[in-house]
Amino acid sequence: MKIKTKKNIMPNNKKYTAWDYIRIPFMSCPGCTLIIGINRIVSAFIPSLVVLITANFIDTAIAVFNGEKSFNAIYLPILCYMLVVIFQNLNYTLIYGFVNIRYDMAIYHNVRSELALKRGRLEYRHIEDNETWNLISRVCDDSLANVAMGMNNLFDIADLCISIISILVILMTQVWWAAAAIMIVAVPLILVAMRGGKEVYDARREVRKHVRRADYLHSVLTKREYIEERALFDYSHKVNEQWYEKYETARKEILKKDIKNQIRMRISSIIALVTAIGIIGVILVPTVKGAMSIGIFIALSNATFNIVDRMSWNLSYVARSFAEKQEYLKDLTKFMALTEREGALDEPENIENISFESIEFKDVSFKYPGTEKYILKNFNLKITKNRHYAFVGINGAGKTTITKLLTGMYQDYDGQILINNRDIKLYGLKALKAIFAVVYQDFARYQVSADDNILLGDIRQLNKKLAKETYDTGKRGIILKEIDLERVINKLPSGLNTYLGKIKTGGVDLSGGEWQRLAVARALYSPAHVRILDEPTAALDPVAESNVYKMFGRISKGKTTIFITHRLGAARLADEIIVIDKGSVAEKGSHEELIKTGGIYAAMFESQKSWYELQGGME
């Protein structure tokens, strides 16, 4: 069952309203939405139709029993009732068995795609902001439940209103004030339910931070990648206690609101029930006097209880759900209004169209949004092509921040960053993606084929493969051999076509070091002018880390490379070492020059020298 992708169904900077619960599904799957809508409206008249059929059947049966009508007269109301039953059964089978499934799939496909694209276009500062991330989680995690059920909720309201009003019209023709009494009771029920729905959503909004923490701890307790350490260190009990604490905090807050709402609804339903009993007692009088037929009395009595029941629970639930969905729309409006980075989803510029000569920082000062501490302060540095650089310094010195500024993640800094003597802000993200390739400390482990893991470094080559065209396998083979992954790949069941990880049946997991090399291979496969290693090997021992950097430097000849590390074994490989301290360049020069200076670098080197000497890795 193929679902077509519809674009721009959720525009930015729009105030989302209840109407969007109809508009978005209709744009995603117009046929299904139309069928569901017509079906729900038609079905809404069934209860009042049943009242009339039931009344007619009882009155006809009494007339036949009294000899006032022939026996054949009973067949028509029986046939009508059978048709209603057949319609309801076929309706459930056809609509809920096929149309609703396709509808849910279309909503899931299109809405999730739109939200994923929006999230991918967001300015990076939103990702690192805790409050904004909570908003993103609320909107994106339950998108299907909120958007798909939002339309169902509106149809539920229409269904209930039509069915209740149509029955009230029948009741009004017999006892007009009884209908008015029911309406008077219904209004406060709806208001109470809507207030409860808003309170519940607000409570869920408040406990979202606890839910996120509980979800993380749950993954630690259940996911496969943590199983070895769970068994070795036996920390499951302690983590489970922390998970239970966060889970209970969230659960109790929601439960408190739910209990409060249940009490309100119970009280409201008792009032409605007393009203219904009073109404039935009143319409009994004209029935006894013969002004109302027995059939109408029984049908209306049954319908009155049905209305009260639906108002007590169905209408209250629907009203509460509507209030919750309205709060979701407020969050959706805020989310879709979040600022974006132009070109965030664009493919990298063709490398042939981008030259690289130099990077220069001129008096750059930067602090993260919402903070007062400067990470970089009056930072000055020039980097030229075809040279190898090492940025060293203690954790928190500002090394990784430099990478974030170079790759365009943040633009709100003081001073200037120039690429080829041109302000970096004048470059689009397409150009920056072509210039830089980065392997981060928290590198990604993509659970796709080994080949695709590497080709992700050059999306154009991956697109060629997906289009079944010839792509660059020669470069890939050289890289695998240089970084000592060739033998690992050859041992996999299907070689480069083997799926990695445990998501897909037959998938093979790699060791931590092999995943690291694969991440390095991805960066090496990129045609980017500048390659950056941002401490991706921090989990390795110092000598193993140095070996990885040596391989990276060896295969990156003719490129500009930047090693970011707080360990100095790899720094010796660089043409120039940049010592960063308190957000500024404290020292720079070759290894020999900095040792002779006897400054920060020399002291760091001396303190780390034993790490390498013990393992024979420091010359």
Image (cartoon, helix red, strand yellow):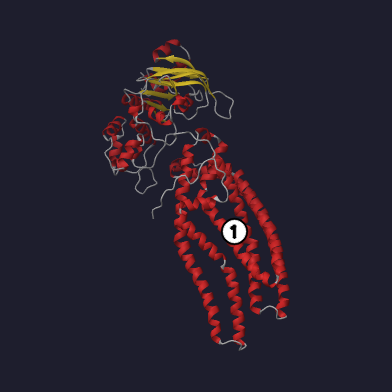
* Residue placed under numbered mark 1 in the picture: 157
Above or below, 383 relative to 32: above
The picture places residue 281, in percent across and down from the top left corner, at 72, 73
169 vs 145, left or right, is: right
Write down the quadrant of residue 283 in the picture: bottom right
Please name whichever residue, 322 or 239, is drawn nearer the observer in this view of the structure.
Answer: 322
The picture places residue 185, in percent across and down from the top left corner, at 70, 62
The picture places residue 144, in percent across and down from the top left corner, at 50, 51
The picture places residue 572, in percent across and down from the top left corner, at 38, 19
What residue is rendered at 73% in x and 80% in y? 289
Residue projecting furthest to the front: 173
Q: Is residue 604 visible?
A: no
Above or below, 70 relative to 25: below
Q: Is the N terminus in the top left, top right, bottom left or bottom right quadrant?
A: bottom left
Q: Dot 1: what SS?
A: helix
Q: Is the C terminus in the top left, top right, bottom left or bottom right quadrant?
A: top left
**Structural crowding at the residue carrying mark 1, measured as other residues with C-alpha within 10 Å and reported as few (<14), some (14–19) or many (≥20):** some
Q: How many marks?
A: 1
Q: Amino acid at mark 1?
A: Ile
Residue projecting furthest to the top: 596
Q: Is residue 453 visible?
A: yes
Above or below, 95 relative to 543: below
Write down the quadrant of residue 360 in the picture: top left
Residue projecting furthest to the bottom: 67
51 vs 550, left or right, is: right
